[in-house]
Amino acid sequence: MSSFETAPAQEGSGGSRVVIPLLFGAVIALVAATVVLFVQLDGVRTDVAKLRESMQVEIANLKEATKLTSAASRRHLDELREELEAARRQAAMAVGQARTEALAKAEQLARQLAEEQRRQHQQVASELSEVRQAATAASARLGEVSNEVSAVKSEVASTKSELEKTIAELKRVTGDMGVMSGLIATNAKELAALKALGDRNYFEFDLKKTKAPQRVGDISILLKRTDPKRNRYTIDIIADDKRVEKKDRGVNEPVQFYVSRARQPYEIVVNEVRRDQIIGYLATPKVQASR
């Protein structure tokens, strides 16, 4: 028996072939949204960790610089005090002009000491102010990140609830050969979600009515007739050097056929029928035998 031999069309499946694929598509979109939200949450957490580490390093550097500056100031002040005490001792022993000069020198050193103390106090106060401002900015940023994390968690919880509700309503779809089909996409957004799952290979096509078959994936398709009013079409499928006709098929209906190198059937799904034109995709199994 030829691998392209079609099974009798099953009755009573017309309604489910339209509603059920839409439900499957919604599930896939919700799954993709959940994955994106989790990735965003992980990125936000990484940014928070990096921000905290950066602020800790900056604060530590400022503290170290402050310590070094304070130590240098103390050494300078100690030197000035020693010079002042030496000058005072010389003044006490001096007489006349020597005493006057010694006292003037002592007063000059005293003024220098006071000025140096004032300058050092101002510098330390400025550095401490910068540290406080940096800490305040870090706290504000951490607060913003915490709010973003809370919002992401809320969206994830809402998406999960909707996903569980939709899964409970889903059913499987049977193709035109009587074989249970996989998930069916009815638009570009749903097809992108199916590609993200990676369960099968997907090849999009936009075929117009021509005399020669057109290549789609590893097969060829010849569009023979279209009926836009009834959303019906007829095509010839060429694979393994054989040709089979799929006559009067409907939109979003899994059109199945076998090829020699695959145990699972190939599926063609047409999402839109126009005048002498069809738009859809070909789904093929991931695992295939070599020729």
Image: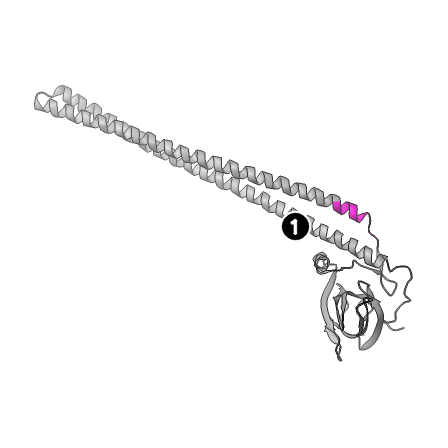
Toward the viewer: 22 or 129? 22
Hey, what amino acid is under mark 1? Val
Residue pointed to by mark 1: 36
Residue 60: name its quadrant: top left
Residue occupying image coordinates x 56% and y 39%:
144
Q: Is residue 111 above or below residue 205?
A: above
Residue 59 located within the stretch drawn in magenta: no
In this picture, residue 249 sits left or right of residue 102: right
Residue 237 position in % (x across, y down): 80, 73
Residue 263 makes an appearance in the image: no
Residue 201 position in % (x across, y down): 73, 63
Point out the stretch of residues depicted in magenta. Answer: 162-171
Task: Please give the count of numbered marks on the rendered protein.
Answer: 1
Q: Please, what is the dominant secondary structure of the magenta stretch?
A: helix
Residue occupying image coordinates x 37% and y 34%:
126
Q: Residues within 10 Å of mark 1 (few under 14, many from 20)?
A: few
Residue 106 position in % (x across, y down): 18, 25
Residue 165 located within the stretch drawn in magenta: yes
Residue 192 position in % (x across, y down): 70, 59
Q: Residue furthest left?
A: 96
Q: At numbered mark 1, what does the secondary structure look like: helix, strand or loop? A: helix
Residue 190: name its quadrant: bottom right
Q: Is residue 4 above or below residue 162?
A: below
Residue occupying image coordinates x 10% and y 24%:
98
In this picture, residue 8 sits left or right of residue 139: right
